[in-house]
């Protein structure tokens, strides 16, 4: 690596003390006295080079505000936000073309998880650690929705910094389950699920980094897809960890889910998550029309594997387990074969995910995210830094715990992140081996029905305990990149009662990379034949 320049400005502030403090951060080392002058000069030159970068204006993709004006922007009143699911309201559509009458999403209203950037619209991220972050860009998925003729009507509450699996961590207050106020709508795409199921919107785009689409979809009773890693661009969406980021559709039925995926999928030329196998937008499969062309055909010749380890995860309500098994076996009535399979490494998946997620999440929150070719939301990073006591005290326990865990692991085991990524490839290969023999893998989405919401007065442990075990069957697929879909399959009462309260249960369908069509075909066949609200 060559030195760019040895020129040093007359007012360069770098001192020998700065040099030696910097070297000390590398380890228990020191520079030889004869070398200090040379390294001091080079560090001063580096400082001057960086100053040139800092003085440049950052480079963001800018939206067409004339074609897509931001209108009717307001913060919702409590009486208009009964479930606590709206974070911000506005109207956004294409006013310059006929997309809203001819596009594949014409006439559809959509909400966005409140970590998806919309230029000139405040983005809350479920937190009050920072104030007044207003994105400069529209996320790629936003532009694609508008080009497809959709009308975006607001931001849906997301859980605190996208780090919690129950719906009481957002700074704006709890999000209530549409089937029972006072119970969780899941997380972290809690507002999306609540608004879709309550018919406040037709569709939603959520984000999933450990189950954050599938868990609220399962608890609220809608269809939620975490697509294959990279199929949907994450450009302009707030990241916790680039190797497990996914954005995807949340809808009331399978066909709508397929239509929404069709509109937002495909490479955008910015997001480096979109590697080998990801189609360009004009090559994205027409999922919706392909499903219609095979609708009501039997699933003859298809083989599904019912994952034993997924059924045996701890915290599993035996009633949920039994319902998942019975619902999976209903595929036999549709013409498919269903067999129990085993992937022992599945049990290690949650530990792999939590290690990668917390180590990378810590780096991101410290402004140290690097080594990716993507759009960096630098203005957001600058709002978080530097961390101080006031900001720390506003963190929800899940977010502060992530940072503590991440800092500890980097300090204790610097090579752990890399080793875990290697082991995740081993886990991916184990699923792929089964998917050579079976078209799909079926397992529970969540181990229980919706829990009661926590209280502000609860201790950190009491708040965190509300989600123990919740994503044990979801998180690993964020890291392996397999597509995974949550489909409602029945209703059960809470273990503690009351007996007449019925809450949704879902199973999860996992497929081969970029084979969402097979997943949709199976899910649609099941949905067409069985009324999950009566099972």
Image: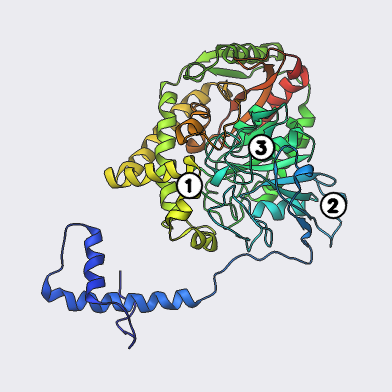
**For discs 1 and 2, the disc positioned in front in the rendered view:** 1
Q: The C terminus is located in which quarter?
A: top right
Residue sitting at x 80%, y 55%: 93
**170 up-or-down from 48: above or below:** above
Q: Position of residue 231 (x, y in %)?
A: 60, 44
Name the image quarter holding residue 59. bottom right
Gap between marks 3 and 2, in whole Å?
30 Å
Q: Position of residue 520 (x, y in %)?
A: 68, 30
504 displayed left or right of 66: left
Q: Nearer the viewer, residue 278 or 523?
A: 523
Q: Which residue is mark 3?
A: 175
Q: Nearer the viewer, residue 96 or 506?
A: 506
Residue sitting at x 49%, y 63%: 382
Q: Which residue is mark 1?
A: 241
Q: Secondary structure at mark 2?
A: helix
Viewer can see residue 188: yes
Residue sitting at x 44%, y 25%: 346
User: Which disc is residue 431 wearing?
Assistant: none
35 displayed left or right of 469: left
**154 up-or-down from 15: above or below:** above
Q: Secondary structure at mark 1?
A: loop
Q: Which comes before the other along the chain, label 1 or label 2? A: 2
Q: Which comes before the other along the chain, label 3 or label 2? A: 2
Q: Which residue is mark 2?
A: 100
**103 up-or-down from 459: above or below:** below
**For discs 3 and 2, the disc positioned in front in the rendered view:** 3
């Amino acid at each position: 690596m060559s030195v760019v320049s040895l020129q040093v400005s007359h007012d360069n502030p770098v001192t020998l003390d700065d040099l030696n403090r910097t070297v000390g951060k590398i380890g228990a080392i020191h520079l030889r006295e004869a070398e200090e002058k040379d390294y001091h000069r080079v560090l001063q030159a580096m400082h001057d080079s960086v100053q040139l970068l800092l003085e440049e204006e950052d480079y963001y993709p800018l939206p067409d505000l004339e074609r897509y004006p931001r209108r009717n922007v307001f913060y919702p009143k409590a009486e208009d936000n009964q479930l606590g699911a709206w974070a911000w309201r506005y109207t956004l559509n294409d006013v310059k073309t006929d997309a809203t009458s001819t596009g594949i999403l014409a006439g559809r209203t959509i909400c966005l998880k409140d970590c998806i950037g919309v230029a000139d619209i405040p983005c809350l991220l479920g937190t009050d650690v920072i104030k007044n972050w207003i994105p400069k860009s529209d996320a790629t998925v936003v532009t694609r929705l508008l080009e497809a003729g959709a009308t975006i009507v607001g931001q849906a509450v997301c859980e605190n910094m996208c780090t919690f699996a129950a719906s009481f961590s957002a700074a704006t207050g709890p999000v209530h389950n549409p089937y029972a106020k006072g119970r969780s709508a899941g997380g972290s795409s809690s507002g999306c699920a609540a608004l879709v199921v309550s018919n406040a919107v037709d569709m939603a785009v959520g984000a999933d980094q450990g189950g954050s689409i599938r868990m609220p979809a399962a608890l609220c009773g809608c269809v939620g897809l975490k697509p294959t890693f990279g199929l949907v661009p994450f450009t302009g969406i707030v990241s916790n960890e680039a190797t497990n980021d996914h954005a995807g559709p949340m809808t009331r039925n399978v066909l709508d889910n397929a239509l929404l995926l069709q509109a937002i999928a495909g490479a955008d030329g910015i997001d480096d998550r979109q590697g080998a196998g990801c189609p360009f937008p004009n090559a994205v499969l027409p999922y919706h029309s392909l499903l219609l062309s095979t609708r009501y055909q039997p699933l003859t010749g298809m083989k599904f594997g019912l994952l034993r380890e997924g059924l045996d995860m701890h915290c599993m309500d035996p009633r949920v387990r039994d319902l998942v098994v019975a619902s999976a076996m209903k595929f036999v009535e549709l013409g498919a074969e269903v067999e129990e399979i085993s992937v022992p490494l599945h049990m290690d998946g949650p530990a792999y995910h939590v290690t990668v997620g917390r180590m990378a999440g810590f780096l991101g929150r410290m402004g140290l995210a690097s080594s990716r070719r993507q759009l960096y939301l630098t203005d957001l990073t600058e709002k978080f830094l530097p961390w101080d006591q006031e900001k720390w005290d506003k963190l929800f326990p899940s977010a502060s715990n992530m940072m503590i865990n991440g800092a500890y692991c980097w300090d204790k085991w610097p090579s752990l992140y890399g080793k875990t990524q290697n082991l995740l490839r081993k886990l991916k290969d184990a699923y792929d081996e089964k998917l050579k023999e079976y078209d799909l893998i079926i397992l529970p989405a969540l181990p229980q029905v919706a829990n009661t919401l926590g209280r502000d007065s609860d201790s950190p442990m009491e708040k965190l305990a509300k989600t123990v075990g919740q994503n044990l069957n979801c998180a690993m697929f964020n890291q392996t990149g397999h597509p995974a879909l949550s489909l409602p399959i029945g209703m059960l009462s809470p273990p503690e009662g009351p007996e007449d309260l019925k809450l949704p249960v879902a199973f999860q369908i996992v497929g081969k990379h970029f084979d969402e069509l097979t997943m949709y075909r199976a899910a649609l066949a099941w949905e067409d034949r069985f009324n999950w609200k009566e099972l």
